[in-house]
Amino acid sequence: MKNTLIIILTLTLLNNCNKIQKQTQGEHERTELVPEPDKAERLKFEAIEKLKKSNCIFDEPDVSLSGIILRNSESATKIIGSENDMDTLDHYRFYSKLKGEILTLTQHPGDSKNQISIIKVQKSDKPNGEFKELNFDTFATGKGIKLGLTKKQIIEKLGDCYAPIDSTKNYIELYYVIEQPQDSKSKILEKNNMPKYFASYKLWNDRLEKFEFGFEYP
């Protein structure tokens, strides 16, 4: 009887240990399956935080492109007209001459017609699209930024107060930002009553292929 009881207790202990081991293993597997935060966003956040701690100030931001001035509806209307329709993402989209470049203009919800807050230019990947062509061979900003520039040329025009994001051998993004309570010499945030200005320049093989700048939606 005593031996039987010992055997039963031993089997019970072994069974419980096995359950605990399986439970621990299952929890470990579930932990491994939890996805890590988006790497690109994490790297961007870390680079911007490092830039802020450096006390570097971006004083001379770009505010226009091919005659279109940020948040100035009259200037935009002169260039793109007043009969354009936005897409579902609040964008107006246009081609340059010969459809080599695509211009995307963002109008934030609640703003007036053609009050553009973000300007983006990139190489055209839709040459057969139905966007309206504007009368520009290439789109250029007020400071002379246009597709095809090198990193050195961009820095010469805008300064070196930028955060390098996702820098690899053949790719880099130069990210400039102005955020309250800081402001530029021209008081760009105060004048436009906006909390943040950003500018992003993406280069592959040291050639600018995509850039955008403007005010984030408050």
Image: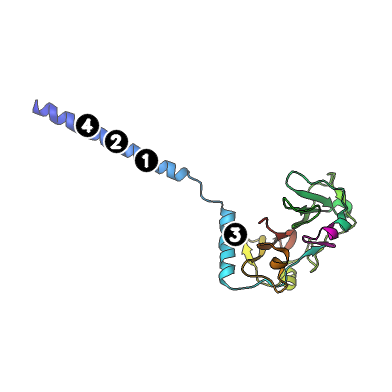
Residue hosting label 3: 44
Q: Tell me which numbered mark, 3 or 4, is placed earlier along the sequence.
A: 4
Amino acid type at image mark 2 = Asn
Single out the mark in the foreground, 3 or 4. Answer: 3
Q: Residue 15, how many percent across, how many down? A: 26, 32
One can see residue 67 in this view: yes
Q: Tell me which numbered mark, 4 or 2, is placed earlier along the sequence.
A: 4
Residue placed farthest to the left in the image? Answer: 2
Q: Residue 189, how many percent across, how many down? A: 69, 66
Amino acid type at image mark 1 = Gln
Residue hosting label 4: 12
Amino acid type at image mark 3 = Lys
Residue hosting label 2: 18
* Quadrant assignment, res 1: top left
Mark 2: secondary structure: helix
| Alpha-carbon span between mark 3 and mark 1 | 35 Å
Q: Is residue 65 left or right of residue 44?
A: right
Q: Which residues are magenta?
A: 66-76
In this view, 210 is above or below 155: above
Number of disc labels: 4
Amino acid type at image mark 4 = Thr
Residue hosting label 1: 25
> Does the magenta portion include 57?
no
Q: Tell me which numbered mark, 3 or 1, is placed earlier along the sequence.
A: 1
In the image, what residue occupies the spot 35% across and 41% down?
24
| Alpha-carbon span between mark 1 and mark 2 | 11 Å
| Alpha-carbon span between mark 1 and mark 4 | 20 Å
Q: Residues within 10 Å of mark 2 (few under 14, many from 20)?
A: few
Mark 1: secondary structure: helix
Of residue 116 and residue 156, the one placed in the foreground of this image is 116
